[in-house]
Amino acid sequence: MRSKPANPDAAPRAPLGLRLAAIGSILFLHLPFVVILLYSFTTDEQTFTFPLPGFTIAWFGEAWNRVDLWSALGLSLRVALGATIVAIVLGTLAAAAVHNSRFFGRDTVSFLVVLPIALPGIVTGIALRSALSTMDIPFTFWTIVVGHATFCIVTVYNNVIARLRRTSGSLIEASMDLGANAFQTFRYVILPSIATALLAGGMLAFALSFDEIIVTTFTAGQQATLPIWIFSQLTKPRDRPVTNVVAVLVVLIMAIPILLANRLTEESSSHSA
Amino acid sequence: MPPAAGAIIVSASNSSFPAIRFSNVSRHFGEVKAVDNVSLDILDGEFFTMLGPSGSGKTTCLRLIAGFDQPTAGGIQLHGQEVIGLPPYERDVNTVFQDYALFPHMTAGENVAYGLMIKKVPKAEREKRVEEILELVRLPGFAQRKPTQLSGGQRQRVALARALINHPRVLLLDEPLGALDLKLRQQMQIELKSIQQRVGITFVFVTHDQEEALTMSDRIAVFSQGRIEQVGTPAELYEHPASAFVAGFVGVSNLVHGSVAQAITSSPTMFSIRPEKIHLADPSAPVPADSYSAEGRVREVVYLGMYTRYVVELDGGGELAVMEQNLHTTSMDVLAAQGRPVRLIWQRNHVSLIPERAN
């Protein structure tokens, strides 16, 4: 960032007002998490009082012993994994098709793949629910996965197509020229070229699916994913600190793939520069 | 077997099939005739250049040989075998790409070994051959570098090594020197030629640079608008251009036709005469029997150090460019020629007649 152009010789240091605004924004974004973090250690089980009346790690132990929590977490992880795999396969194929060939309706396909991420979750949810009930499909693990895949595909698709656009088309020809068939070319040239894009897109997809609640509500039936479990806990004030503990753990778990995805895309873009 | 180094003529004669044969090959993209009814034989072991401006169809021809593209009509044979419909990985041909197309996630050594890896050559032999071929392209010890750590010239050599290590019978080169600076390009021209003579395989080289083509080639095909204008040795193309296009594209030439030609040769047939073949003389100078002459006035003098370029306005209309070496003249002498009446004299055997074409 540059400071005012009127003073080009000065060090590029942001003015005080801008710095305060930046700090304010970051606090606004992350202070709620700090509150959650604090209250997962409180001894007071019903109300939020500040300062904390006492410090305890008892809630972590209690959370550990909750079977319903573990089954919700397990379901969420499996759904996220399933949605990610579906997204990686379909997103990569869609990106390859749109990138490699010119066909009728190509731009439309591209648009339709990207659309679900922009579509409000409530619309996707209602649409899926009415589709499922019209076709008499019962709510299962797979209905949740399909619901999540609708908006997870786009993260993989976008990452992969951006990478393919930066990859020279002559690489594929060079590989074929050197004796590699289509499969070998995919294995040794295309896959390594898009690997980091796949990883980044996949992790984003995983993160999106893991905390999704709106679409899930419409496609899960009686099953409780972790977000649904947390939401249902809000009506039970006695368990509030347990919810806080879970929230903290979820944030910590999700931070890892997001940070990794960020790091990977940064690395690969600085490579190609 | 690849022929011995330098034995181009011999190897050409003891092979019953040409390395590459195009029979009435066309490649049309909708209305655009990228390649239009081209027939061509490229002999085994020769350094063959496809020369032409961009969009003339030379690169498309190369892609047809490699198998990246298929002709819309006609047949292509490699060493007598019909290859239409054969994918690139089933052709005994390797390509050096214009942008080198080195795999960015592999080291230079892995790039070079790629073809052997696909053929499942054992690792030990692979490494030995990589070392040898990197020696040949004068990049010993570069196997561990990533392509991003190499200069343009070094990448070019890696791309060459990656293709040559497979011992293809034909090597295709798509403007491989285009991205290099002039010095490096001239050095690589000589190196490519000597590598070709050492390995003894057929090189098909695509370029738009006529000087490059003249420097390296055994034979050249001049392309224009999807067709071949002329095929010949560099000397044939330069001394006897078959068309106005070749005369203008290969070197610089004066094209004279119509009444101006009639006045000089007493025939209206178009002819071409190279500027350096024309001798600038006094208006009173005698004209030898085996020469043509024309009178005119020097309109422009450009002193180029080694040479001087004159533009002479002919009395009978039109103008001729003349190149004279500054053997005994100084810049003062040549610049004083401006506006002077002169007689231009050139030998008849330096003239190439260019008959009008049907098309």
Image: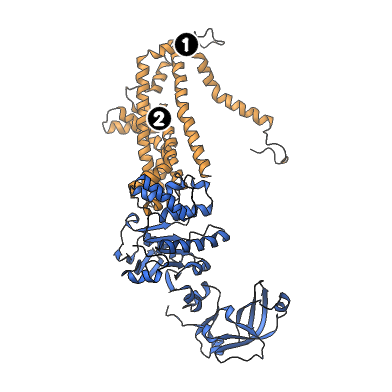
Chain colours: A orange, B blue
In which chain is the residue bearing label 2? A
**So how many labels did they put on this image?**
2
Which is more N-terminal, label 2 or label 1?
1
Relative depth, front residue between B7 and A197: B7
Q: Residue drawn at (51%, 83%), measured in percent from left and top?
A: B271
Q: Secondary structure at mark 1?
A: loop
Residue ranking furthest to the left: A136
In which chain is the residue bearing label 1? A
Q: Write down the residue under mark 1.
A: A57
Image position, residue B123 (x, y; %)? 37, 45
Drawn side of residue B27 relative to residue B316, left or right: left
Drawn side of residue B327 relative to residue B242, left or right: right
B143, above or below A58, in the image: below
Which quadrant: the N terminus of chain A? top right
Q: Write down the residue under mark 2.
A: A209
Q: Label for residue A177?
A: none
> What's the amino acid at mark 1?
Ile
Q: CA distance from mark 1 to mark 2?
A: 29 Å
Q: Is residue B156 visible?
A: yes
Snapshot quadrant of residue B324: bottom right
CB contact under 8 Å: marks 1 and 2: no
Image position, residue A28 (x, y; %)? 57, 24
- Density class for disc 1 (Cα within 10 Å; few <14, some 14-19, many ≥20) is few
Q: Secondary structure at mark 2?
A: helix
- Density class for disc 2 (Cα within 10 Å; few <14, some 14-19, many ≥20) is many
Mark 1 or 2, closer to the camera: 1
1 and 2 marks on the same chain: yes
> What's the amino acid at mark 2?
Ser
Q: Is residue B100 visible?
A: no
Image position, residue A132 (x, y; %)? 30, 32
A33, above or below B9, in the image: above
